[in-house]
Image (cartoon, helix red, strand yellow):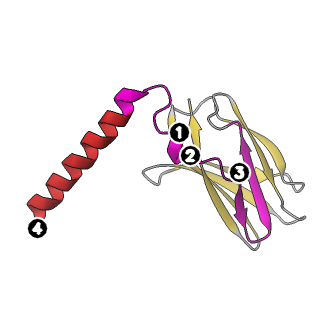
Amino acid sequence: DGPLSSVALMKDYIDIVRGEYMQDPDNFGYQWLGTDENFVGNTRLDVYPNPASSNLRVNYDAQGRSVTYTIHDLFGREIEAGQINPDGMFSLPVGHLEKGMYILTVIDEKKVSSTKVLIN
């Protein structure tokens, strides 16, 4: 045990990830996006297409509540924030974002829901 065993473990993990990338570089990382629908309580959050290159379509069961969204990169930096239509449906332009994984968070008066999105 100790720092050296942690480093060895990390190196092993990196080798595994590198091997998965080399097997299928075009689809690498998609397995972490998942295809399960996102439910928070009784509130449903649908985001498609995912991955996206120009626009994300977001459907959120806002139930008439005030709703905002944020997009964070994987370092936790807020990239963008805004309001969502009260009906919970909107198109979010993402063509200006760099390729990569982001976290879309939808916040209403009662709940916070997040999902991963891939920009390609």
Pointers 1 and 2 in contact (CB under 8 A)? yes
| Number of numbered discs | 4
Quadrant placement of the C terminus: top right
Rounded to the nearest angstrom, the CA distance separating label 4 from label 1 is: 33 Å
> Which residue matches tag 2?
33
Q: Residue 19 location in percent, x, y?
A: 31, 34
Position in image of residue 16 (x %, y %) = 30, 42
Specify which label sits upstream in the sequence, 4 or 1.
Answer: 4
Q: Are marks 3 and 2 in contact (CB under 8 Å)?
A: no
Task: Between label 3 and label 4, give the one nearer the viewer.
Answer: 4
Residue highlighted by disc 4: 2
Horizontal arrangement in the rendering, residue 116 relative to residue 36 (left or right) = left
Which residue is found at the position 38% from the left and 32% from the top?
21
Instruction: Say which of 14 and 78 sits in front.
Output: 14
Secondary structure category for the residue under label 4: loop
The residue sitting at 90% across, 54% down in the picture is 87
Residue of label 1: 30
- With respect to residue 16, does 78 lie above or below? below
Q: Is residue 78 left or right of residue 65?
A: left
Inspect the image, locate mark 2, and give the three-letter code of the amino acid beneath it: Leu
Kindly identify which residue carries mark 3.
Answer: 82
**Mark 1–mark 2 distance (CA, rounded to whole Å):** 5 Å
